């Protein structure tokens, strides 16, 4: 039974993890979810580490980056920490992040929900089909939250 760490924040303005969990449970019925909610993106990495140490096989994280330069530096710090964790543990951390300046209002909410669902599906495929599970989609210009751009 695969265990997935789901880490999200109270800073976010959309409950993305809830959407992702529905997809994960539908696609991988035997899945075990360990959810951990932290204040903000710079608190995400340690939550992932703790859940990996408790035996989770992969993680999916939901960050929300504010519009200022300081917010973007916070994202960079989180992103580097998540890359280090992936390498250290040899486990996927699917980083689902919404940047508040991507859109606004209802459109931003739609981007967040679609990104959460589509990356949850990516993770479900990696968990159930392994490294070549996404290969049929290689080079097809997939985008999460926005329309796919297609191959060249
Ligand atoms: C500047 C800043 N920007 C963000 C952000 O864009 N998104 C977010 O989720 N959290 C932000 N935070 C809060 C930090 O990530 C963290 O929660 C606090 O510094 C407490 O450790 C901070 C401090």
Image (cartoon, rainbow, N blue to C red):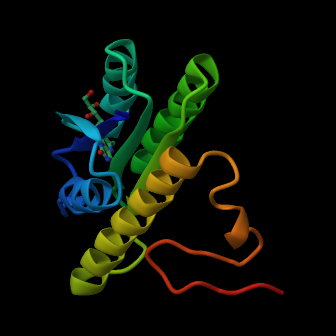
Q: Residue at x 54, y 37 (%)?
A: 92
Report the residue that reaches farthest toward the right: 152
Locate the C terminus and report the quarter of the image it occupies. Answer: bottom right
Left or right relative to 137: residue 12: left
Quarter of the image for residue 1 reads top left
As drawn, 10 above or below 26: above
Left or right relative to 123: residue 31: left
Judge whether residue 107 can be spotted in this image.
yes
Left or right relative to 135: residue 50: left
As drawn, 11 above or below 26: above
Judge whether residue 69 can be spotted in this image.
no
Q: Position of residue 56 (x, y in %)?
A: 37, 25
Report the residue that reaches farthest toward the top: 53
Q: Residue at x 49, y 49 (%)?
A: 128
Left or right relative to 114: residue 137: right
Which quadrant of the render holds ligand 1?
A: top left
Q: Residue at x 22, y 60 (%)?
A: 22
Q: Position of residue 55 (x, y in %)?
A: 36, 18
Q: Residue at x 25, y 44 (%)?
A: 8
Q: Position of residue 66 (x, y in %)?
A: 34, 57
> How many discs appear?
0
As drawn, 143 above or below 79: below
Q: Position of residue 21 (x, y in %)?
A: 24, 54
């Amino acid at each position: 039974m695969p265990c997935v760490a789901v880490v999200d924040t109270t800073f976010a303005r959309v409950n993305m993890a809830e959407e992702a969990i529905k997809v994960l449970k539908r696609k991988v019925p035997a899945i075990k979810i360990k959810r951990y909610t932290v204040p903000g993106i710079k608190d995400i990495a340690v939550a992932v580490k703790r859940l990996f140490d408790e035996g989770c096989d992969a993680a999916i994280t939901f960050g929300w980056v504010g519009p200022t330069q300081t917010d973007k530096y916070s994202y960079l710090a989180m992103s580097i920490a998540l890359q280090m964790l992936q390498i250290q543990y040899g486990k996927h951390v699917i980083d689902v992040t919404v940047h508040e300046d991507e859109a606004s209002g209802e459109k931003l909410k739609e981007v967040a929900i679609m990104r959460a669902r589509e990356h949850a599906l990516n993770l479900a495929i990696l968990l159930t089909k392994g490294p070549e599970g996404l290969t049929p989609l290689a080079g097809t210009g997939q985008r999460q939250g926005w329309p796919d751009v297609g191959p060249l």
